[in-house]
Image (cartoon, grey):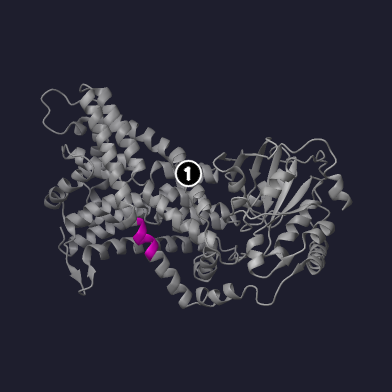
Amino acid sequence: MAEASIAFQAPNPPRRVALLGNPNCGKTALFNLLTGSRQKVANYAGVTVERKEGELRTPGGRSVAVLDLPGAYSLNALSADEAVTRDVVTGRRDQLPDLLVCVTDATNLRLNLRLVLEARRLGVPMVMALNMTDMAERQGIRVDTDILSRELGIPVIRTVGVRRNGATELLAALDAPVPSASPLPWEAPSMDDVLASHQEVRRILDLAVQTPQGSLATSDRIDRVVLHPVWGTLVLGVTLFLMFQAVFSWANVPMDAIKAGTEAVGGWVQGVMAEGPLRSLLVDGVVAGVGGVLVFLPQILILFLFILALEDSGYLPRAAFLLDRAMGTVGLSGRSFIPLLSSFACAIPGIMATRTISNWRDRLTTILIAPLMTCSARLPVYALLIGAFIPQRDVLGLFNLQGVVLFALYVFGIVSAMAVAWVLKRLRTQQGHSPLLMELPAYRWPNLRNLLLGLWERAWIFLRRVGTIILTLTILLWFLSSYPAPPAGATGPAIEYSFAGRLGQLLEHVFAPIGFNWQISIALVPGMAAREVAVGALGTVYALSATGEEVAGALEPLIAGSWSLATALSLLVWFVFAPQCLSTLATVRRETNSWKQVFIMAGYLFGLAYVACFITYRVALALGAG
C-alpha cells in the first residue's frame, strides 16, 4: 500500500486522464458515462486511428479532460490501435496523462490484469477501475478490492459503466491529488517477462478473486449453438437477413421525410428567388447535394444500430470467429467480416472499420474489396433498371422475380469480392493465413445509452467527412452540367452542350462496345460523386423536369422503350463493379496514406466493370436481347 499512499500525497489533482483497457472491457461505456455528449472524435496526427476525447465535471466542480485510448491487450503493439495506445501512455505521442485509469472487466480479470501489470511499470500515476462489477456479482464472482489494491500497489475502484451512478467513486477519486508523472523507458517484454506476468496474475487472482464453478455456463450453452458449424451458420444467416430487411424497410419513412423536406426547401427557394444561375446553384447544387447525402443516412444508422447492438451483446466476435475458416480460404481472417458487413450500408464506414485488423495485408485486401459489397447508393439505380426491364411475376410461386434479380446482384458482388481476395492471396504467396486470436466476451444486453451515443457519433462522422465532399463535388458537377449555356436556336437538352455533355459524347466512344449511349455516358460523370446521382442525371439528359421519385417513375417507361435489354443488363453489371465514388477513393487515400492504393482500386474496378459488361452485353445480344 506504500505506492498507493504516495500516489495521493501530491498537491495537484489530475487535469488530464486517460482510460486504458482491453477491448470489450466496457471502457467506452465508462467514457460515455463520464463525458456524455461533451466529447469529440478526430484522428491522431499521421495515422488513421480515432482519437476520442471528452470533458467531465468532478464533484468538486473541476473540469477534467478524458482521453479514451484504443483498446489494447498489450503495450507490445500488434496493430495500429495498440501502437497509438502504447505511444500515448509512454509519452511518445500526445501529452502524457496526469493519471492513467486502467479499466478492467471484473468477469475476466485473468486477461485484463496482464495489461495492468505492464502499465504499472511505466511510472505514471494510475488507478484501476474494476468495471462490470454488476455482471460479476450476478455470476457469483467475488473480488476483494482491498487485497487487489494491496497486491497491485494502486487504488482499485468499483465502476459500472452502464449505470447512471456507476462512476461515483471514480469521480470522487479524480478530486484527490496525484504526483507528477515520472515516466520510465518502456521496452518490449521478453519471453521471461511474459511468463513472469502470467505467474503474477495467477498469484493475485488466487488471493483476491473467488470464481464459482460454471460461472460462464449461460454463455457456454449459447455458444454450443452459435458457434456450431451448421446451426451457427444458420443463426448468422437469419440474423443478417433480418438486419437487411430492417435496413430497407425501416428506413422508408425517414428517407421519404428527408426527400420531402429537400423538395420543400428546393421549392421554397424557387418560389422566393428569380430564375437565374444563383437559384440553380442553390436548388440543383446545394439543396440537391445535401439531400442526396442525407437521404441515405437512415439506412446507414439502422445498419449501425444492428452492428453496435450485436457488438455490445458479444455476438459479433463470435460471428467473426465462425467465418474465420471460410474467409481464410480466400486469404482473409474473420476480422474482415465486420468491415465488409458495414460496407453494405456504405463503403466509407466499412473501410474505416478495417482499423481493427492488425495484419496490414489483410487490412489492405479488405479495403480493396469493400466497395464490391452492394452499398445503399446503388439501390436507386437498381430499382430504376429492374423496374423498367424485369417484369413483375412470381418464381416458383413464392418469390418475386424482381426481388430475385436484386438478391442476385448482391450475391454477385459478394462472390466477386471473394474472388478478388483469392487472387490477391495468390499474388502474395510468401505470406500465409494470419490466425484469428480474439476474446469472446460473455453475452450481455446492449445498453441503450451506449447505442444512442454510438449512433450520434457515427452520424456526425458521416456528415462531416462525407457530406462536405459530396456536396462540393455536386456543386462542381452542377457547374460542369450547366455551362456553357446552349447556343441560340439549340433544340437538344441544355446538358448536351455543357462541359459534362461534351465529355459524355467523348466517353461514348469508350463505352459503345458495352452498349452505353451518350446519355448513359453523361450520367456516369455525376455518378462519380455518388452513384444515386445517376438517376437524376439521366432525367436531366432526357429533358425531364421532375425530380426525386418522379424522375424514376418517368424514366422507367422512357428507357424501357429506348434501351435494349442487353444495355440494361450491362448497366446493372457496371454498377456492381463501377469505379468508386470519389468520396470513397478519398477515404482509401486517408486510411492507407497512399495514392498508389487509390489508383490500384480505381483501376481494377474499372477493368472488372468493363470486362464484365462487355461479356454481359455480347452474350445478351447473342441470346436475342438486343
Q: Whole-percent x and y of residue 494?
A: 18, 31
Q: Whole-percent x and y of residue 475?
A: 33, 31
Image side of residue 319 versus residue 95, left or right: left
Q: Main secondary structure of the magenta part?
A: helix
What residue did someone put label 1 on? 587
Q: Quadrant of the C terminus?
A: bottom left
- Looking at the rendering, which quadrant does residue 132 occupy? bottom right
Q: Whole-percent x and y of residue 408?
A: 30, 64
**Callout 1 environment at 10 Å: few (<14), some (14 to 19), or many (20+)?**
many
Residue for point 21% across, 33% down: 495
**Label total for image:** 1
Residue for point 22% across, 42% down: 538
Q: Is residue 510 visible?
A: no
Residue for point 86% across, 47% down: 5
Choose between 21 and 492: the one closer to the eye: 21
| Above or below for 613 versus 597 | below
Choose between 262 and 190: the one closer to the eye: 262
Kind of residue indicated by mark 1: Thr
Give the residues drawn in magenta, as a range.
Answer: 242-247
Choose between 471 and 171: the one closer to the eye: 171
Image side of residue 130 versus residue 423, left or right: right
Q: Residue furthest right?
A: 2
Q: Whole-percent x and y of residue 462?
A: 45, 43
- Looking at the rendering, which quadrant does residue 429 occupy? bottom right
Q: Is residue 211 visible?
A: yes
Q: Tell whether position 482 is magenta.
A: no
Secondary structure of the residue carrying tag 1 is: helix
